[in-house]
Amino acid sequence: MQLIGEDLSLQHPTWGRLHIRNKRPAGTEVFPPDRVVVMQHNATDGATIFDVPFNGLSWMDYIAGRGFDVYCYDLPGYGRTERPPQMSEPAENNAPFLHTPDAVDCLSRVVDFVRERRNIGRLCLIGWSWGTAVASKYAGSNPDCVERLTLYAPVWNRPASARSPLQVDGPIAAYRSITKEATINRRRNGLTDQQAVTLLPPEWFEQWWDATLAADPGAPPDTLRAPNGVVEDARNTWNVGKSPYDPAKIKCPVLVIVGELDPDTQPELAINLFPLLTGAAWKRLTIVSGGTHAIMMEANRMLLFRSVQQFLEEEAPGLGAVT
């Protein structure tokens, strides 16, 4: 299937231009609500990872190749979206910015943009890591706008013994700078040397790293920058057992999916969250074997892609046929 990739933009009254990426089958401009997807990125990497063609195929390619109209976008301070002025100054000169409510507001505007573009009332959401809190908060507040919700590597209230990768001691600056070495070490956290070799193709990491840096030409060499509003949120909410959203308010079908080797959002968090989704029309919990936090750039990524795609495409459960 031939796909079209298109770069779009949306002007936010506070944050400026939001960069939106769209993939869809060529020659198709009309899509039903259950075939339109918006992907919400995490706290550090931005949306680039959704459309890096590892081995010639990105996650957006996979979804669009199944006949979907799929979008991702960069929040302010990430990727190709306009960088706030705080990022032109030393990080310690300003307070943390872009908190979870700000991200929810941005997602709301992107969803409205896509719904108007396709003349639909509802669409599907996929959130990754911090993006699950953003998407869940939006879904709980806008039940008529969400067809289905995927929570991939969900953040949730942590036990006191589990230190968050976003946990810092002392004052929090406006943004953080992450080196390539630190990123590699985080990807390998908790893995044996053999698992790291088997699960984390080094050439895919290099491909993603180059694409991510290209989206932030203002960053220091070989450094990834990200806003710290989410770090402050983590300190005040899920790191101390205070959820940033109410799972019971989510009414649409929900897939909770996590890698069995995820050191950042451990399967325990997903298992604890799942029974709290009491308002969901129906739900499923999936633990992906041989996956860490960024499964979409790992050797077992097809387990993630296929599991999410099944959820997006399958019919709602019922009594089933008599055989």
Image (cartoon, helix red, strand yellow):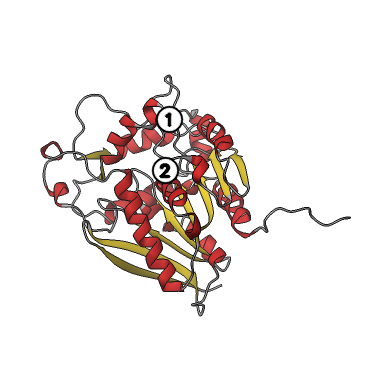
The percent coordinates of residue 137 (x first, y second) are 42, 46
Q: Earlier in the sequence, mark 2 or mark 1?
A: 2
Residue located 54% across and 48% down the image: 301
Q: Amino acid at mark 2?
A: Ala
Question: In terms of depth relative to the viewer, which is nearer, 184 or 237?
Answer: 237
Residue located 49% across and 70% down the image: 120
* Mark 2 Cα shell of 10 Å, populated few (<14), some (14-19), many (≥20): many
Residue under numbered circle 2:
133
Task: Look at the image and tell me in which quarter the N terminus lies.
Answer: bottom right
The percent coordinates of residue 204 (x first, y second) are 43, 49
Task: Look at the image and tell me in which quarter the C terminus lies.
Answer: bottom right
Question: In terms of depth relative to the viewer, which is nearer, 222 or 102?
Answer: 102
Give me the C-alpha separation between circle 2 and circle 1. Answer: 23 Å
Secondary structure category for the residue under label 2: helix
The percent coordinates of residue 134 (x first, y second) are 39, 47
Secondary structure category for the residue under label 1: loop
Residue 55 seen by the camera: no
* Mark 1 Cα shell of 10 Å, populated few (<14), some (14-19), many (≥20): some
- Per the rendering, the mark at residue 189 is 1
Q: Are marks 2 and 1 in contact (CB under 8 Å)?
A: no
Residue 26 seen by the camera: yes
Going by the image, does 256 lie left or right of 264? right
Residue 10 in the image: above or below residue 308: below
Going by the image, does 24 lie left or right of 167? right
In front: label 2 or label 1: 2
Q: Amino acid at mark 1?
A: Asn
Residue 227 in the image: above or below residue 236: below
